[in-house]
C-alpha cells in the first residue's frame, strides 16, 4: 500500500518528531503524571489527515495501547500502588481509536478514488490506477452508436470499480486489525465492534401495495417518515414533530419510486433521497449526508418500490426517536401489472 521511497521520505522529514515521540513514550512508562506525556498526542495529531500514512498510524496505535495496557496491568509492581485512572485512560483511548479509524476509513476511500480515472488515447480507453502506475486498455469501436457507447462506458466504470476493490483488499489486510481493540481492555470478552444497535426493534408490518405519498421530517437526521398507501391506512415511524417537513403526493400505479438513497450515521438514518421514474426529479437529500455511509436500495428501473417497513432508533445527539431501520420491498413492474389486471 505504501511506496518504499514515500515512507523513507516521510520518516526523514519526521525524524525530529519521532525522537519526541520516543521521549514521550518513556514519560508514559516512567512518569504517568508528567505533562510531557500529552506531547505525544499533539505531535502525532499533526498527521490526522495524511490518509496515505494510515497503516503507520495503526502500527503506532498498537504501540500506544500496549504501553497503556501494561501500565494499567502492572501499576502496583511498578509504582507500588494501584491507580484506577490508568484503566480509565486505557478505556477512553480504545474508544477514541475506534472512532478515529471508523471516520478515517471513509477519508481513505475518497483519497484512493482520486488515483483512479480513465482517458481516451488513440482509439483506446485506458483505465488508470495512478497509485500503482498501471492501467488496463479497451479498444473503442469505430462509428459506435449511442447504445454501444453506453455499454462501453459501463465497462470503463467496472474497470475503475475493480481497481478500487483491489486497493480495498490490500488495505484491509492492515485495517482489519483495528477491529481487535477490545483485546487491550482488562477482563475483556468477545463483543460487537464499535457502536452497535443494542436495543430490540420490530419493523412495521407494511404489506406491498401502491404508494401514493410520502412525508419526511428531517434536520441533520431523519426524524420521522410517513408512507401513504392506496386503499389503506398510512404508516408512520419516528418523531413527526421534529425538524422540517416535506410532503410528496401524486404517486400511483404509473408514477412510482424506483430507488431510495439512504445515508447512515449517528446510529440512525441521517439522510434519505427518493428517486422516481419518468420525468419526475429526485427529492434531493433530505437530512444530512456528511460523514455517513450511503446505501442505495433499488434493483433496476424495471422495479418499483411497493412497501417500506420501518422501526425507530435513538441517535447519540437526539433524545427523541429517529428513523433507524428500514426494509424496502420492490415489485417487478410487469409482474405487478399482470397481478393488477388479473384482479
Image: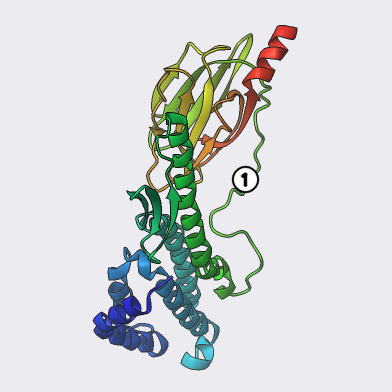
What SS does tag 1 mark?
loop
Above/below status of 164 relative to 262: below
Instruction: Look at the image and tell me in which quarter the C terminus lies.
Output: top right
Q: Residue at x 37, y 70 (%)?
A: 53
Q: Quadrant of residue 333?
A: top right
Colouring scheme, one of rainbow, by chain, secondary structure, one colour: rainbow
Residue 26 coordinates in the image, percent (x, y): 37, 89
Numbered disc total:
1
Above/below status of 36 relative to 89: below
Residue 80 coordinates in the image, percent (x, y): 49, 92
Residue that numbered label 1 is attached to: 199
Residue density around tag 1, few if under 14, some if 14–19, many if 20 or more, within 10 Å: few
Above/below status of 150 relative to 29: above
Camera-side residue: 159 or 175? 159
177 with respect to 63 (left or right): right
Camera-side residue: 177 or 5? 5
Residue 105 seen in the figure: yes
Q: Residue at x 53, y 87 (%)?
A: 74
Above/below status of 153 relative to 186: above
Residue 28 coordinates in the image, percent (x, y): 39, 84
Residue 241 seen in the figure: no
Residue 120 coordinates in the image, percent (x, y): 34, 48
Q: Residue reaching furthest right?
A: 342
Q: Residue at x 51, y 70 (%)?
A: 174
81 with respect to 51 (left or right): right
Amino acid at each position: 500500500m505504501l511506496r518504499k521511497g514515500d515512507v523513507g521520505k516521510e520518516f526523514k522529514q519526521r525524524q525530529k518528531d519521532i525522537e519526541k515521540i520516543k521521549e514521550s513514550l518513556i514519560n508514559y512508562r516512567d512518569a504517568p503524571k508528567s505533562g510531557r506525556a500529552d506531547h505525544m498526542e499533539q505531535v502525532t495529531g499533526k498527521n490526522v489527515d495524511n490518509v496515505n500514512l494510515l497503516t503507520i498510524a495503526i502500527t503506532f496505535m498498537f504501540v500506544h495501547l500496549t504501553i497503556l495496557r501494561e501500565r494499567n496491568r502492572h501499576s502496583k509492581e511498578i509504582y507500588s500502588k494501584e491507580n484506577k485512572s490508568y484503566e480509565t485512560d486505557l478505556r477512553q483511548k480504545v474508544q477514541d481509536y475506534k472512532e478515529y479509524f471508523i471516520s478515517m476509513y471513509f477519508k481513505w476511500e475518497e483519497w484512493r478514488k482520486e488515483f483512479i480515472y480513465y482517458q481516451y488515447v488513440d482509439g483506446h480507453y485506458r483505465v488508470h490506477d495512478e497509485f500503482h502506475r498501471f492501467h488496463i486498455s479497451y479498444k473503442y469501436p469505430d462509428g459506435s452508436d449511442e447504445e454501444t457507447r453506453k455499454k462501453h462506458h459501463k465497462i470503463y466504470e467496472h474497470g475503475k470499480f475493480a481497481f478500487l476493490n483491489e486497493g480495498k483488499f490490500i488495505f484491509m489486510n492492515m485495517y482489519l486489525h483495528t477491529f481487535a481493540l477490545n483485546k487491550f481492555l482488562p477482563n475483556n470478552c468477545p463483543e460487537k465492534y464499535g457502536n452497535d444497535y443494542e436495543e430490540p426493534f420490530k419493523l412495521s408490518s407494511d404489506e406491498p401495495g401502491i404508494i401514493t405519498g410520502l412525508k419526511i421530517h428531517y434536520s441533520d437526521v431523519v426524524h420521522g417518515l410517513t408512507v401513504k398507501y392506496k386503499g389503506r391506512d398510512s404508516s408512520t415511524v419516528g418523531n413527526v414533530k421534529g425538524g422540517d417537513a416535506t410532503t410528496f403526493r401524486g404517486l400511483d400505479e404509473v408514477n412510482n419510486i424506483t430507488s431510495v438513497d439512504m445515508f447512515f450515521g449517528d446510529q440512525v438514518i441521517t439522510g434519505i433521497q427518493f428517486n422516481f421514474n419518468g420525468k419526475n426529479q429526485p427529492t434531493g437529500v433530505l437530512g444530512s449526508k456528511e460523514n455517513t455511509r450511503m446505501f442505495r436500495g433499488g434493483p433496476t428501473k424495471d422495479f418499483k418500490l411497493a412497501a417500506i417497513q420501518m422501526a425507530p432508533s435513538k441517535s447519540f445527539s437526539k433524545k427523541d426517536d429517529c428513523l433507524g431501520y428500514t426494509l424496502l420491498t420492490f415489485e417487478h413492474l410487469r409482474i405487478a401489472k399482470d397481478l393488477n389486471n388479473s384482479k
